[in-house]
Image (cartoon, grey):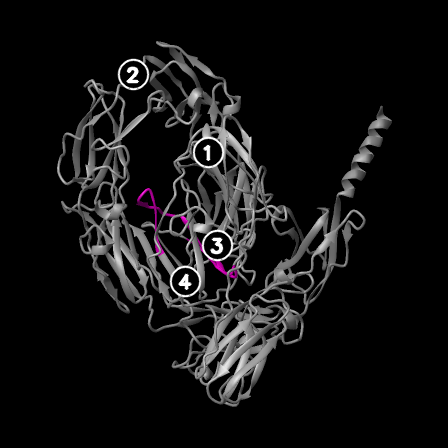
Amino acid sequence: MKQLLVTLSLFLIASTMLFAGSISGEVSGNPVSGLIATAFQPGNPQAHYVTPVEDSVYTLTDVELGTYIVKLSGIGVHIFYDGVFCIEDATPVELTETNPDATDINFTIDPILQGMISGHLILQGGHGGPGFIEGSVLLYDQLPIDPSILPIQEYEIMGMMYLFQDVGFGTYYVALEIPGEPTLYYDNVEDPNLATAIVLDETNPSAFDIDFLIEGQFIGSGEINGLVTNELGEAVADAHVELFTFYGMPWFQHSTNTDENGLYVLENIPVGEYYLFVQKEMYLPYFYDGVTSWEEATLITVNEDDVITIDPVLQPLVLYSVTGTVLDNEGNPVEGCQIMAITAGTGPGGNMWPNWSTSSLADGTFELNIPEGDYIFRARLFNWMNPQVQYYDHKDNWQEADVVTVNDNITDINFDFEEVITYDAVVSGVVTDENSQAVEDATVFLYPVACMNWHFGHAITDEAGLYEISDIPPGDYILSVHAQSYLPYFYDGVTSWEDATVITIAEGDTITINPVLQPLVLYTVSGFVHDDLGNPVSDCIVFAHSTSWNPGGPGGNGGGNGGCGMLNTQPDENGYFELNVPEGEYIFGAETLDWMNMQIQFYDHKSSPAEADVVLVEDDVTGIDFDFEALVTFDNSISGNITLAGVPIENAIVVGISADQTFSTSTFTNLFGQYELANLPENDYYIFAFSPGSVHTFYPGVINFEDAVAVTALGTVTGIDFELVPVEGGGYLALNGFVRDIQNQPIANSTVIISDLEGNVVAMAQTNNDGFYETNNVIVGDVVVSATKVFYNTSTTTTTMIGNATIDFTLESTGSTGSNDTPLIAGVLTVVNYPNPFNPSTNISFNIPTASSVKVTVYNTKGQLVTTLVDDHFETGIYNIVWNGTDRSNKPVSSGIYYYKVSAAGKSITNKMLMLK
């Protein structure tokens, strides 16, 4: 027996070794302490291996077989194998069963190659918008006190930072040249004799933060302060004070809260015009000067060094009484009918109020206390055997409902229903946790098995964990409980409705059920955030967004994450972060907090959630890393407002993707539902947005990509407003399947939408990296199921749901709609390249209006010069040159976005092109 165990153990060890290997190598050249070697698979956070470099040697062991990117990082070092600085240029390392060990994966840290100087262009307290600075950063190897001394490198400004690479050890000086402004030398002096030298040597091979402070139009030296009081002159503590601009550049937003004495201070404000907004619970919203909406607000002009005092006086939220009676068709009072006042859009604060609701009493009467505004009133009976909804005044839908203006107490908002049957069965009990402690604010639902589209009734537990649901018709029911930080509960002690025990209720029954909730298990997701130079970034927010959010389901999030919405955290000073999330599938992203250079990146190095990798979390996950790229700026923007159910929605994700599929970007809506997609290259863009409670909705408020309307980004485009399509929630049937393309390849991040025959969305899901989707919220009966994604034709089918089902979809790509037919116009400098996108070469054609010197250069997205194609004198005429996709050393460049610049006749034109491989 022992021999058998030994043999089996040896077999298992041998089998394990077949599926694991190693990566090793040496590090030579300039010695740097604290080096780390990392092997990882983009898109697979579990395949992430890290080890320190010791005595110039590293070995990564127990590496699963597969293809890896290997990286060497440390202070001033950020290199991918084989000696490149960008992940796109890295040489993959493959481990196979026949060759499980990769040796000689070596790195050389050459002092000349590793020397670099970088910095930022900092605008005091503000910024001037994309592309507002034109000029160059110059690198000198001697003090530039004489015009005959020329720079050894020149970096053309295309963003808010610069980088000089391939800098040997020595002493250097950096200068900033902006047309029309005096030359600045580091450290921000105009006299070159006062310039600060930058020394690179073996101990300090790189110099970061060689920054220039730019003064002028946008000076961050203003201040606004004051005291917030109520109408009685009493200080209002913890009021939210916000200063902001609307669309157009620069975008600025600065906020604080009042202290215990009602005082606030907003500092470092750039020159400009601003709105001041104050908000506090049970007070009307305040916009300067004493109005309740930004449309009526007075702009505040802030000049350099201004100190402005503004003392907002908040007015109390005045509530008016709205009363009425609910009767049946025989004039009998109806108890327990839900009455809701729905904002019609003209309440104070621009439709910022929530909906208000109450229930009718035993005598059929109700009273609502609501602020001034225009409302639609709705009465709803939740009796699943005889459900009824009525809008005031005796209307069947909200489109026909009377809008009631509330500016005083109102009576006689009455409703009359058809015959209403009452019952006397009751289900009650106490909800506790596994330690027998009462669970407050848990929601208890009772679903009739015969009609899972409805919950008959629900109750909220009190501080003692007690609940009661009464007036229950006879029948079979499923009871569920949902509470924050707990697993969903279905009677009797399971976590899904399929496993639930059916409760049979007879007329007059009194049933006691005491649910015991189990705690939600959280897993740790961790990673690092760096900038494009490998420096840690702490001034950002890392967030997790579930891909399977569905209202009404277990936990409200696709079957088991306990009501988790958008989770977020901030990295520490080393750029390290941890997020604790429930089991599920997520999209992770990082957003910078620097309002001057706002960026969002989705894992793994994607610019929009439509492209993001979906990460399955069923254990702790490491290696969710982000590396922000250097910004390239443009003068175009698209902005608008996003609403859900007529109410501005905060923190909705808004995505813009160019029609030629060469550029995408994302942002979040602010408190007022407003968004701005800035830094857009000139192009046509499809805009879509989503938030918890909505489906992915394309502009102008549609859910299928074919119905979306593209918006042309040319200058500042405003008013691109649309309403998100809500997900109403529904039953508990499960629907799953795969979404693939016509080559049978999985399509990740496509949206599957389930609607009833009236077009109401009842459930939705997103596909993971395998193209798989699943939702547990589908109603019984006929439904319309569709799968859609940007740049794919929507596929739709109708089915009858009587149980769990599987539906697969095949989507066909719409292809690129990009155009390259821009004409060359005689008499003016015009430029075009074709084809675009291209592989392996593209033609750059330009028309020279007058004889002049012509320079044609190509840059990468970091603003670094790739190659100079032309630098010569040309006569008037049309010319054509070819770029074959190589750099100055005639080496092929990687695929991606590049910019070509044509300078002639005193003008310059820069256009974007995309190289595909």
Instruction: State the SS at label 3.
Output: loop
**Residue span colored magenta:** 640-667
Residue at the spot of label 4: 712
Left or right of 359? Residue 782 is right
Badge 4 or badge 1: first in the primary sequence: 4
Q: Is residue 400 left or right of residue 28?
A: left
Indicate which disc, 2 or 4, sits on the residue closer to the N terminus: 2
Look at label 4 and name its amino acid.
Answer: Thr
Mark 4 or mark 1, whichever is nearer to me: 1
Marks 2/4: CA–CA distance: 57 Å
User: Residue 615 magenta-drawn?
Assistant: no
Q: Nearer the viewer, residue 374 or 317?
A: 374
Q: Earlier in the sequence, mark 3 or mark 4?
A: 3
**Mark 3 residue crowding within 10 angstroms, few (<14) / some (14–19) / many (20+):** many
Q: Which element carries disc 1, helix, strand or loop?
A: strand
- Cβ atoms at labels 3 and 4 below 8 Å apart: no
Is 647 magenta? The answer is yes
Q: Residue 783 got which mark?
A: 1
* Gap between marks 3 and 4 measured at Cα: 35 Å
Q: Nearer the viewer, mark 3 or mark 2?
A: 2
Kind of residue at badge 2:
Ile
Q: Are marks 4 and 1 in contact (CB under 8 Å)?
A: no
| Vertical arrangement, residue 724 with respect to residue 858, above or below | above
